[in-house]
Image: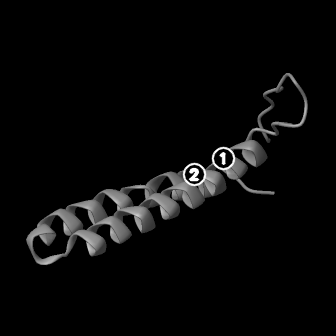
Amino acid sequence: MKSRFDLEMEINEGYNFSSNLKNLSYNVGELSEDEMVNALIGLSVLIDCHTNKLYETMCSVFNLNTREDQMQFQFND
């Protein structure tokens, strides 16, 4: 079972995407249109994967049962 520390670590990993976008914008003039589109699509896929992982960790930490119509929040002790 994951803890709140795992959740915090995964939230902090999101800042890497900001840094990646800044690096990409710095090199905009050197990339072709195809390279730029591919880079943006790649970042989009990575963000989607990270968001799914973060959501699963959140569900684990707060004992959320997403299969039920109503989610019940319970903190792990």
For the residues marked 2 and 1, what is the alpha-carbon distance in whole angstroms?
6 Å
Indicate whether 47 appears above or below 65: below
Q: Position of residue 68 (x, y in %)?
A: 91, 30
Residue that protrudes farthest toward the top in the picture:
70
Element at label 2? helix
Which mark identifies residue 51? 2
Q: In screen coordinates, is 44 left or right of 37?
A: right
Q: Position of residue 43 (x, y in %)?
A: 41, 63
**Residue sitting nearer the eye, 69 or 63:** 69
Indicate whether 8 appears above or below 21: above
The amino acid type, in three-letter code, at marker 1 is: Tyr
State the quadrant of the C terminus: top right
Q: Quadrant of residue 61?
A: top right
Element at label 1? helix
Q: Quadrant of residue 14?
A: bottom left
Rate crowding at label 1 as few (under 14), some (14 to 19) or many (20 or more) other CA atoms within 10 Å.
some
Which mark identifies residue 55? 1
Marks 2,1: beta carbons within 8 A: yes
Q: Position of residue 18 (x, y in %)?
A: 31, 56
Residue that protrudes farthest toward the left in the picture:
29
